[in-house]
Every structure is written in structure tokens, then in C-alpha cells.
Image (cartoon, rainbow, N blue to C red):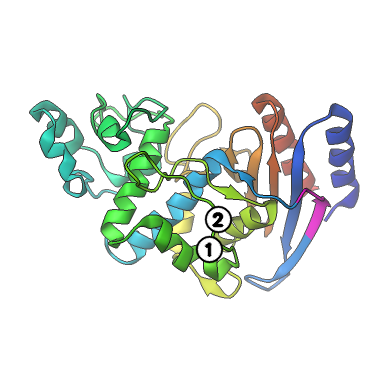
């Protein structure tokens, strides 16, 4: 780790009064697919904070596990898993007939508004005037919410329960708080709460191409697909709930929740913060530079 580069970032954070709850860096050991060294760049408060849209990358891992079990594929239509569509007008059912898992993972479901709302989020999401035949980048919490509900249904159990057993417990993360919709379904888009170290453990799964802490969580094939740019978003590109930022793929939550991934270099930086999003973007670029220094 280039200590001088990171010291400069910490100095800048303090001088600008940025509210950062912690920063960690991980560097993989040479010749070791999983082990390495974790460095505390900025000690935080040790508390769990809202990771906002970084939650989407956790939901993405659940979908990847469904892929690996042969329950879904990127081009699988999603409508068979939403019987609620039967209660909607025929035109809406026809629109959703063209929606695939890939639309959900790549935020390319044109016509889907950003925010979920109302007393029944699932009905709200399924009622939107989507245009799957005209895919374009349309960043939306509703899209990720649908992905979480879909994963739960194909896996055959509540997704929060599944994730605790299959992801969080093996990662050493004890019962993180996970939000739910008004109808009680796992909210896969936001509002999960983790410490910076716990968020880093999730990031290690991506950095290790599906393997971390001696455990294989998802296939290397899925992680490589997730880290591939599938959609032009005008900001570098978008994979499966991952943002392309220069040479890095990034798990991102608004206000500065970040895991910066450089898998080919075996390096990763994790941050929890609460700052203006423009400042967060600038700091992300500075952190990528420090990782590469």
C-alpha cells in the first residue's frame, strides 16, 4: 500500500470536513487467490450505517447464486415468477412479457421510475409503463426491488433468510439489518446497514471472483459477467449492479458508500461516509489513484 498516497487522502478529508465513517484497503498476497493484508486507512466509529444502493450489489450476488443453481439465466423472462401480473390489464402483462433478468441486473428497463412508493411496492413496480424492447440505462430502486423478489421466489425462501445463511454467516457478518417493503418482502435496492469492515467483506467476494475467506459463494463466471460493462450510462458503463469508474468496478451507494474493485491488481478500497455526492465521486477518483500508486 502506498502510505503517502493514502495519507494525502486522509489529510484532504479532514481539511474539507468530509464526514467519513471509515476507510479500509485490502491487497491480495502474491500468488494467493484469497489471502492478503487489510489496512485501516481511516478508523471509523465501528457502527453500522446505511449503505444505500450498495445493497444492490448484495442482491446481485443472490441472483448469481440462483444462476449457479440453474434456476435462472440472464435472458430468462421474469413474468412467470410474478403471478400478480394476472391482476393487471392485458397491455401491462404484454409489456412485462418481454422483461428479462438481464433488464433488471443492468438497469436497462426503460420506463421504470427511480423510487418505490405506495402501500404495495410490488404492485407499483409491476404497473409501470416499461419498454423492454427499447432498453436504455434507467437507474431505479424499483428494478433492484424486483430482482430481490425474483431471487427469493426462484430460491424458494425469504431472501433475507437465504442471505444470512449463504452469504453473511460465512463472511462472519452477524445478522445485518435489512429493509423490507410494506408488504414484507426483502428490499433489495437500499437501506441495508453494515460497518465498513462488513461492507469490505462483501467486496472481497467480488474481488476474489466469487471466492473469499476460503468459501466459494458464486461462480467466477458470474462475477466476471457482473464486472463486464453491459449498459452505457454516460459515466463509464454499468455491469450487474456495479459501476465502471476508469480502471475500476465500483459498488456504489449515494453519499459515499463505496467498494472500489481492481481485481486484476488484487486491490480493493472500502468506504462508508455521508457527504455530497459530487464530493463522493471526486473522492472515489482519488482513492482509485491511491490504489494504483
How many residues crowd mark 1 within 10 Å: few (<14), some (14–19), many (20+)? many
Please identify the quarter of the rendering in which residue 79 is found: top left
Who is closer to the viewer here, 272 or 181?
181
Instruction: Look at discs 2 and 1 and give the one toward the viewer.
Output: 2
Residue visible at 62% across and 60% down in the picture: 201
Q: Which residue is mark 1?
A: 168
Q: Most extreme residue toward the left, as rendered?
A: 90
Residue visible at 75% across and 43% down in the picture: 21
Please identify the quarter of the rendering in which residue 205 is found: bottom right
- Residue 44 drawn in magenta: yes
x and y percentages locating residue 257 in the rendered image? 64, 41
Is residue 227 visible to the viewer in this orientation of the structure? no
Q: Which residues are magenta?
A: 39-45
Instruction: Kindly check if marks 2 and 1 are in contact, taking CB atoms under 8 A apart as contact.
Output: yes
Q: Which residue is mark 2?
A: 176
x and y percentages locating residue 101 in the rendered image? 30, 46
Amino acid at each position: 500500500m502506498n502510505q503517502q498516497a493514502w495519507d494525502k487522502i486522509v489529510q484532504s478529508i479532514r481539511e474539507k470536513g468530509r464526514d467519513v465513517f471509515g476507510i479500509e484497503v485490502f491487497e491480495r498476497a502474491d500468488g494467493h487467490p484469497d489471502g492478503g493484508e487489510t489496512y485501516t486507512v481511516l478508523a471509523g466509529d465501528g457502527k453500522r450505517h446505511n449503505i444505500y444502493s450498495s445493497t444492490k450489489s448484495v442482491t446481485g450476488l443472490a441472483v448469481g447464486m440462483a444462476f449457479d443453481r440453474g434456476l435462472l439465466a440472464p435472458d430468462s423472462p421474469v413474468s412467470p415468477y410474478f403471478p400478480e401480473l394476472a391482476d393487471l390489464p392485458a397491455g401491462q402483462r404484454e409489456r412485462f412479457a418481454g422483461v428479462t433478468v438481464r433488464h433488471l441486473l443492468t438497469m436497462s428497463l426503460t420506463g421504470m421510475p427511480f423510487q418505490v412508493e405506495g402501500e404495495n411496492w410490488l404492485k407499483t413496480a409491476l404497473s409501470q409503463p416499461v419498454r423492454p424492447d427499447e432498453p436504455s440505462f434507467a437507474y431505479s430502486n424499483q428494478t433492484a426491488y424486483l430482482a430481490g423478489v425474483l431471487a427469493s421466489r426462484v430460491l424458494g425462501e425469504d431472501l433475507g433468510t437465504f442471505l444470512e445463511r449463504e452469504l453473511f454467516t460465512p463472511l462472519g457478518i452477524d445478522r445485518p439489518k435489512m429493509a423490507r417493503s410494506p408488504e414484507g418482502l426483502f428490499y433489495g435496492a437500499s437501506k441495508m446497514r453494515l460497518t465498513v469492515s462488513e461492507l469490505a467483506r462483501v467486496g472481497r467476494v467480488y474481488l476474489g471472483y466469487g471466492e473469499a475467506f476460503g468459501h466459494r459463494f458464486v461462480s467466477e463466471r458470474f462475477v466476471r459477467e457482473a464486472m463486464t460493462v453491459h449498459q452505457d450510462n454516460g459515466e463509464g458503463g454499468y455491469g450487474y449492479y456495479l459501476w465502471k469508474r476508469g480502471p475500476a468496478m465500483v459498488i456504489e451507494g449515494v453519499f459515499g458508500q463505496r467498494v472500489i474493485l481492481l481485481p486484476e491488481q488484487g486491490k480493493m478500497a472500502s468506504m462508508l461516509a455521508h457527504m455530497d455526492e459530487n464530493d463522493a465521486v471526486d473522492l472515489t477518483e482519488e482513492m482509485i489513484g491511491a490504489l494504483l500508486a
